[in-house]
Amino acid sequence: MYNAQDEQKYFGLSKKFQNADLSIDQIEELRDVLRYHEYKYAVTNNPVISDYEYDQLFKKLEALESTYPLLITPDSPTQRVASDLTPDMEAVEHLSPMLSLGNSYNDQDLHDFDQQIKRLLNLPEDQDVSYCVEPKFDGGSLAVIYDNDFLVRSATRGNGIKGEEMTANARAIPSIPLKANFSALGIKKVELRGEGLIRVENFDIINKQREKDGLALFANPRNAATGGLRMKDPNETRKRGIEVFMFQIGVAQDANGKDMLPTFKTHYQGIEVLRSLGFKVPKAAIKECKNIDEAIDFCNLWQQKRMEYPYEIDGMVVKVNSLALQERAGFTQHHPRWAIAFKFKAKQATTTLMGVEYQIGKIGSVTPVAKVEPVQLAGVTVSSISLHNADFISSKDLRLGDKVLIERAGDVIPYIVKSFPELRDDQVVPIIFPTHCPSCNTPLAKAENEAAWRCLNVNCTEQIKQRMYFHVSKNAMDIDGFGPSYIDRFYEEGWIRDLSDIYNLDYDKIATLEGFGKRSGENLETAITKAKANPIHRLLHSLSIHHLGKKASKLIAENISHVLDLRQWSYEDFVDIKDIGPVVAENVVAYFADDQNIALLEKMESLGVNLTQTDDDKPLQIAEDAIFAGKSILFTGKLQKLGRKEAQELAAKAGAKNISAVSSKLNILVVGEKAGSKLKKAQALGTVDIMTEDEFIEQMR
């Protein structure tokens, strides 16, 4: 339908229109842009902009048409809902239209919606309206019809009036009952609204299998679900693991065709009826709210908890709960007036890959970092994204100048999902991974079993600085206030060249530097003096020995009286320690066989850095009758009286082993405020001793 030239044109206009005030002369061009994105999103399942970006363009068209109503055309995107109809599937008409929803993005939008409802229904401004709030699932919408209790037809949402008939596929989905006892309610014919979804964990499995099979990866669970609903082979639909949540009764009629919906007083009651009949409906993320403030609180709660939900949700839907009030409020051509979507901050967005920088790590790993055109994503501006390694670049087929889809994994870490080859022009060029270190020009090397390319020059300036950054960090020697900017400045001054120099600084000179002063020098001296007395497990971890982490450093420190004892340790000595593997053993042996490293440690000791085992390094002595001896423990939720680390240390002293996840191996779960999915999993197991923070503290006495 669209050629490559069209793709470039409409994507370019999308970006241009998002950041500009549009005039009346651009209204038809804006409609064309929206039609293109509807096609990419709903027909090909390959959107090139995020939902949020589309919504902003749609709002601009609505605003223009509101200002110039005579220019509204019957085929404007505002005059119909988006269509996912394709020519090769039979279209069937829904019993009642499946409309879109209006969108809101903040608390004020929801307050405005509440006031609009009251004006529409002639209610006093101070009267509470009850709302039902439920998840806005990000999947494929469908309608199912039951007649005389039997499933007789199913169709995709299509254009809202007609959808693609997919009854055979619906019958292959286990969460859609083939028979439901509607007749017990006096209902002969019913049309339900639902959403086909794929669990996030199952989506990852699907993509891994597609990667093995050499197939294109799905950008998100929605693509996988919508494509699965429309497959020609119902067996393939079943294999995809689609689950369907029902979220509304659209039509209900008795044997004489009489409307039975008024027998349900509220939307929530209808959901509960569907639950009782065996349909999959929202559970934890649905609530009857007495007023808009309660509804807003629930929306914001789930914006924070969205990652705990096992399915993709991109917002919450706020519906007037009373069906009688819904009837009075009515509909526009585009959406019901009695419902609105509260959209979460965007997790995905499109942008342009402008360049790639290469960072050198503390062990010489070269990490490519994408520099993208700054874009708002989940409440922050993203301009840099790790590309991990050369293999990642080639597997994603990334090129300079590419339009790319990005997301924030867990709403935290930016990640490039895919590029859009169809949007490429002559300006796009391949990314050439360097063959030599960008810092010292040493040829890069790659171990057979690793993906990273490394600079093997341990005297590489960038590596030295990275090792210093890590050495002073909170996870290592924890030198308070000594950050990368200090290291860069002192390195520039020529005062530090290796780790030992950190402990031999001239604090009077530091006090004379611009931006420092006497107080800065004194504070730094205090922090470094304190760090000199650290236990040796911190020192071992701070040396940047490849693969030597916190846990292994502690295990080694338990077995030596002095750090330099490790000069005499063999590979076998290390692997004899439980949980020390062969890779760590080889790397530590190699480190302590290097005379330069030994000289560095001897110099550090001469400057006052502790290399002798402390009480904090020694193994924890657990009495056989310790209250938690031999048991595993996990803390979840917000503790009020103890810090998480403090609680874990208390548990360890009482003989418990701290673990990080709920499983059959867990014995005790201590719950604080707002305990979430871990508490539910533990309750489901039925074998876990669940206690409050106060009960845990009482056990410690």
Image (cartoon, rainbow, N blue to C red):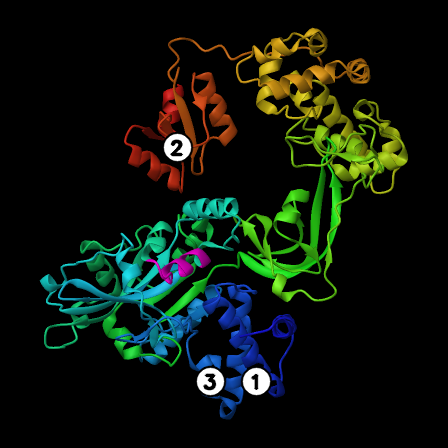
Q: Position of residue 343 (x, y in %)?
A: 46, 63
Q: Residue at x 36, y 50 (%)?
A: 239
Q: For the residue marked with disc 2, what is the amino acid?
A: Val
Q: Earlier in the sequence, mark 1 or mark 2?
A: 1
694 over 231 or under it: above or below: above
Which quadrant is home to the C terminus? top left
Mark drawn on residue 28: 1
Q: Secondary structure at mark 2?
A: loop
| Residue 243 visible in the shown view | yes
For the residue pair 146 and 654, the one nearer the viewer reads as 146
- Circle 3 is placed at which residue position? 75
Q: For the residue marked with disc 3, what is the amino acid?
A: Asp
Q: Position of residue 515 (x, y in %)?
A: 83, 42
Highlighted magenta segment, given as a residue range:
223-233
Q: Would you say 40 lies left or right of 444 here?
A: left
| Marks 2 & 3, CB-CB < 8 Å contact | no
Q: Residue at x 65, y 21 (%)?
A: 538
161 over 539 or under it: above or below: below
